[in-house]
Each structure stands twice: as C-alpha cells, then as structure tokens.
Amino acid sequence: MLADVSFWVLGIVAVLSGFAVFRLNSMARVTFALLASFLAVAGLVVLLGLGYLGVVTALMMVIEMVVMAVFMIMYMMNPAGLMPMSMYHNKAGSMAISVGTFAVLAVGILLTDWPVRRGVPAPAQTYQLGLALMGGQMLTMMTLGVTLFATIVATVVLSTGRGRYDRYGDDLAAPRADDPAGGGVG
Amino acid sequence: MDTGDRMALPLWWVPLLPVLLIVVTAGVVAVDEAAAARARGAREGLLGSAVVPLREGARLLVGQRRRTVAADSVLWRIGGATLPVAALLAAAVVPLGSRPVADLTDGVVWFNAMEVLAWAAVWMVGWGANSALSLVGGYRFVAQGLAYELPHMFALITAALAAGSLRVTDIVAAQQDLWFVVIMPVAFVAYLVSAVAMAFWGPFDAAVGRDLAGGAAAELSGVDRLVFAGGRWLLLVVAVAMAVPLFLGGGAGPWLPAWGWVAVKAGALLTSVLWLRRRFPTVRMDRFTEVSWVVLVPLTVAQALVVALVVLGRGM
C-alpha cells in the first residue's frame, strides 16, 4: 500500500518536474526542476530495493545540479539569469523527442511480458554490487579511472593560461609562485 | 530500501527527533551566547543566556519578512526551508545512544547526501533574493562545498572502510576494541574541519561573511532568517555529532548510559568547534580552497590507503 502510494507520487513528481524543465523560463528554476525530477527517480530506485544506488544517485545529482547551475548561468546569454528565457533551442524538436521517448518507453514497459522473479535478492546488496563492479572487472575499472583522471588533468593543463614557468620563472627557481590570486599554500 | 531496522528506535521517535534536536541546538546556542557575553565582558548569567535563543526566536517569528524587487521567491523560500529539513534527515541515521532513529544499510551515504542538500539550499537562498551580495555569498558556498566535499567524503568512507559496512551502527560496533580516531586521526580532523565548512561555520563562514553584509543571508529577515539561521545551527550540531559514532566509538564508555556518552562526546566536539570559531577570523576563500585541494585531499587519500592496508592485513 505504502509502496504503491510512494510509487505513484514519486513517478508523477518525476514526470511533472521533468516536463517543467520545458515550461519554466528561468535558468535557476529549470536546474532545480531537473534536480527534483532526479531526486524523485532516486526515490523510485530506493523503492526498487536498491538502497545504495538510490541514495548515491541523490548525492551525485545534488552536487551535479548545483555545479550545473553555476555553469549554465555563467555561459548563457543573460548572465544575471533573472530575465525570462528558455533553456533549450529547437523547442518543437526537443519537446517531440522527449515526449516521444517517454511514450515509447512507457508503452514498452506496459506491453512487455515481464518474467516472474525466481529466488530472492542477495542479503548484502551493496557488497554484491561492489563485487560485480570491481571483482571481475577490476582491470577495466582501474583503467577507466586512470583514463578519466588523465583526461581531467590534460584538459586543465591545456586550458589554463598560466603554466609552471609563468608561476615559478623560466628556471622554476622562484621561492614563491607568482599568482594573480594568492592561495593558501603559495 | 532495505531499512533493516535491526537497531532502529521505535517509530514514535520520528516526531520526537526534531523536538529533541531543536532543544539540544537551542542549548548549544545558549552556551555559545554565554561564551560570547563573557568575551565582551557583559554580566549576563547562565539564565540570561538560556533565554537568548527563545527571545531571538520569538523576535524573528513576529518580525516582518523582507521582500525584494523581482525576487525568485519560489527558490528563495524552498532554499531556506531545505536547510533545517536536510539537517533533520541527516540526523535520522545518527545513533542517539546506541540506536539511531533509522538504521539504514547505507547510512553513511544517506548522511552525506543530506549534507550536500545544504549546497543547493544556500545557493537558492543566495540566488532568490535578487541581490548582488547574497548571490556572491551563494556562489562562495558552492566553491567552498566543492573544495570540502572531497576530503569530507574520503573521511566518511575511511570510517566505513575500516568497519566494512556503510551502516552507522556497524561502524560503532567495529570500534569496540579501538576507537577509529586512534587508527585514523587524519580522517577525524579532516572530517571535523570539513563538517564545519559544510555547515559554513567557524572560520569557514565566508558565504555569509560580514564583508558581504551577511552574504547569502543578507536579505533574510523575520521567519525566513529564523529558519535559515536555525537550519545552519542544526546542520552544525548534526554534522559534528556524527563524528561521535564515526570516530569516537559512539555511546561506548564506563558508568554513563550510551546516550550520556554520546552527549558528552558531542558536547566536547561542539565546544572545540565553537572555540575555534571565536579563536580564528574568517579564512579567505582563495586561501582555504587551495588548502583543501592541495593539502586535505592528498592527506585523506593517504589516510584511506593506510586504513585499507590495515583492513587487508587483518584479512577481512
């Protein structure tokens, strides 16, 4: 009973706030409408019995959306962001794609003949998840992690205007870095 | 979720938790006020300080709410209300003695997820007022949160790693022989520092700093200010109190009951945090973000590595 009510409430919140992304005209509100949609989906994942995945989705999405808010507002045409504007281009196209995708997925879910569950879920699900991700796939995950990290470092190095020679002089011998804004460790 | 209420308190604790937390927080505010009164040489007495939170709360309740031109009131109000709600939800997994209100299997992750809601909250409060100074405050807190979330996460994960479980009561149980503060002092200190920073408190209060005329909270008055300031106090109390089950063995100790030891330990930690705040001026953003990225993150990663080796050595 409680699970049914939660499912419908969370599902409706997820769809409505997802749709609000198209209807609202402030970048900040759009960001948090999207966050509300993600949080409702995280609640649905928890409802499926996947506690760790649900909570971690909520954690990552809150961080991500707040960072998104900063960047979206930074890069848009109207930096103050309080003037009405829509956050998407090609209104008709994007609306058609999203509503269409939703309809296709919903119809697919309703028409599929789902198998009945055999057996019971493992007792320590988080542990099983970790094992599935890291056990047999340890090499893949480690490679992935190092690759992602290298990409981040390379992007920062390529995009920064000032390298170590600007900071520490041509022979890297300056005792303190010459930075436009001083940091806590020099 | 597999709530697995192995050790959860009875259900009637759910409505009791906010009341308890608010009363405790009011007590902390009163003690802080007494210390402030002593520092400025005023003779207020303990009773005089004890009524300060009540008086201040009543004053803000009847005070007029400020309205600003072209404010985004939806985000503004939601942001303010999110702060205390997030603190309460985070408190649900903190053992109040030996048992928490909700003994979630992923308690540590839940706690962190509720804490980061504060980012969204403060940014929304800063944004909503349509005021330049409060917007700057909101952005400051995002930068601060980003810089301090990583050491915070590593400190939390290190405790979970040593216990081999994300459940807070399991982490307490794993400290029966040895408190985690002994085997992971760096994680403990990093946790406390980043917890204070996540509650934008102490020397890390640049987001609501005086140089911004109150920063994110600049345009708040009346009940809005009460909710925001109260939420910030709650967040501080909860975040600091979480250090007790994570690193100080929870309610373990002789003579006193478990809840007594939790109160004593949390009180000692809160006292040191409040002392730190009175002792040090606000740290500048550009300074402390770099300290966090360049010093705290490597230190906490190294700490996690050491603990991981210890766990492996034990053959868990």
Image (cartoon, coloured by chain):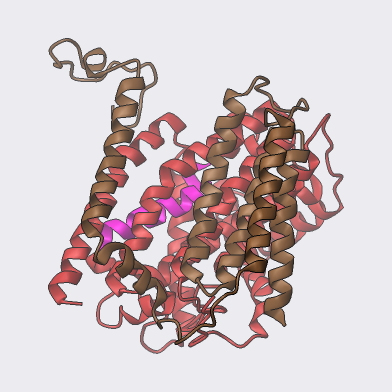
Determine the image quadrant of residue B114.
bottom right
Residue at point 42%, 29% (across, down): B286
Q: Is residue B51 left or right of residue A76?
A: right
Q: Is residue B194 magenta?
A: yes
Please identify the quadrant where the N terminus of chain B is shown: bottom right
Q: Quadrant of the C terminus of chain B?
A: bottom left
Name above or below for residue A151 compared with residue B112: above
Horizontal and vertical percent position of residue B153: 39, 55
Res. A11 visible in picture = yes
Which residue appears at 13% of the width and 72% of the height?
A: B313
Question: Can residue B266 be seen at all in this image of the molecule?
Answer: no
**Nearer the observer, B91 or A75:** A75
Per the rendered image, the range of residues in magenta is B184-206
Q: Is residue B29 one of those drawn in magenta?
A: no
Q: Is residue A108 above or below residue A20?
A: below
Q: Where is B71 relative to A77, above or below?
A: below
- In front: B45, or B289? B289
Q: Could you say where residue A148 lies in the image, as x and y percent from the top left?
A: 31, 41
* Residue appearing at x 41%, y 70% in the figure: B244
Name the spot of residue A179 as percent of width and height, x first: 33, 18
Colour representing chain B: red
Left or right: A24, with A53 as reference point: right
Residue A155 position, x and y percent, is: 34, 28
Residue B216, picture quadrant: top right
Q: Quadrant of residue B15?
A: bottom right
The residue drawn where x is 61% and y is 66% is A44
What chain is colored brown?
Answer: A
